[in-house]
Structures are given as C-alpha cells and as structure tokens.
Image (cartoon, grey):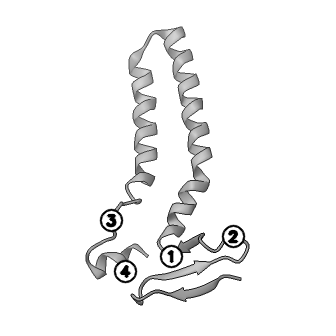
Amino acid sequence: MPIVLCDHHPSKKKLINPQYPPHFTISENDEDKAIYLTLFPFFLMVFFLLFFFCSISIYLTNSVVFVSFFFCLFVLFFSNFIKNDLPFPPTTKSASTTLR
C-alpha cells in the first residue's frame, strides 16, 4: 500500500511504494508516463511489423506511396501519445483540471 508524502508545495504529492527503493518515487503526473512506458513494447512491435510489411511491399510492388501511407498512419498513431507527454506542466489551473 503506497504511502502519501507531501512536499513543501501542497499540489506535489508523492507516492512511495515500499517494494521499491526509497529514492524511487512516483508523482501523480507520472502515472500517465508509466502507462506510456508499459505500452512502449507494443508500439515497438507495431513499428517493426510496419517496417517488415513495408519492406515486403517495396520488394513486391515497388510502390513508395503504399509505404508512405503506412508510415504516415504510424506517425499519426504514435504522435497522439507523444503530444500528451509535455516536458512542462500546464500553466493555467483550468487546463490541468480539464486534463484529469
């Protein structure tokens, strides 16, 4: 069961899991990042499958349009998850409440 510790700022709560070392802390904003890290092997597998099928399609059909279509699909699919992981927190309070 995680123990909740409060920093100097009241909004910065940290969760400490006893099964991890003491320096390993998970903040509330890192929960989404943990979800993305668990989905990363899936995205890596999808990328290699796309690369495999695109290379076969280039070899068989010599069509670059087919490959670029799948590449654009992959970039759109993956960028949807990357754009939510911003390096800075939202500045306004209303933006942070709408994201939750």
Q: Nearer the viewer, residue 92 or 58?
A: 92
Question: Could you classify mark 1 by the number of other residues whose Cα lies within 10 Å: few (under 14), some (14-19), or many (20 or more)?
Answer: few
Residue at image coords 54%, 56%: 36
Q: Amino acid at mark 4?
A: Thr
| Gap in angstroms between the C-alphas marked 1 and 4 | 13 Å
Question: Could you classify mark 3 by the number of other residues whose Cα lies within 10 Å: few (under 14), some (14-19), or many (20 or more)?
Answer: few
Which of disc 3 and disc 1 is earlier in sequence? Answer: 1
SS for callout 1: loop
Q: Amino acid at mark 1?
A: Glu
The percent coordinates of residue 4 (x first, y second) are: 58, 87
| Gap in angstroms between the C-alphas marked 1 and 3 | 14 Å
SS for callout 2: loop
Tell me the residue that label 4 is attached to: 97
Residue at image coords 50%, 68%: 30
Nearer the camera: disc 3 or disc 2: 2
Tell me the residue that label 3 is attached to: 88
Residue 64 lies in what quarter of the image? top left
Q: Nearer the viewer, residue 66 or 97?
A: 97
Tell me the residue that label 1 is attached to: 28
Which of disc 1 and disc 2 is earlier in sequence? Answer: 2
| Gap in angstroms between the C-alphas marked 2 and 4 | 30 Å
Q: Amino acid at mark 2?
A: Tyr
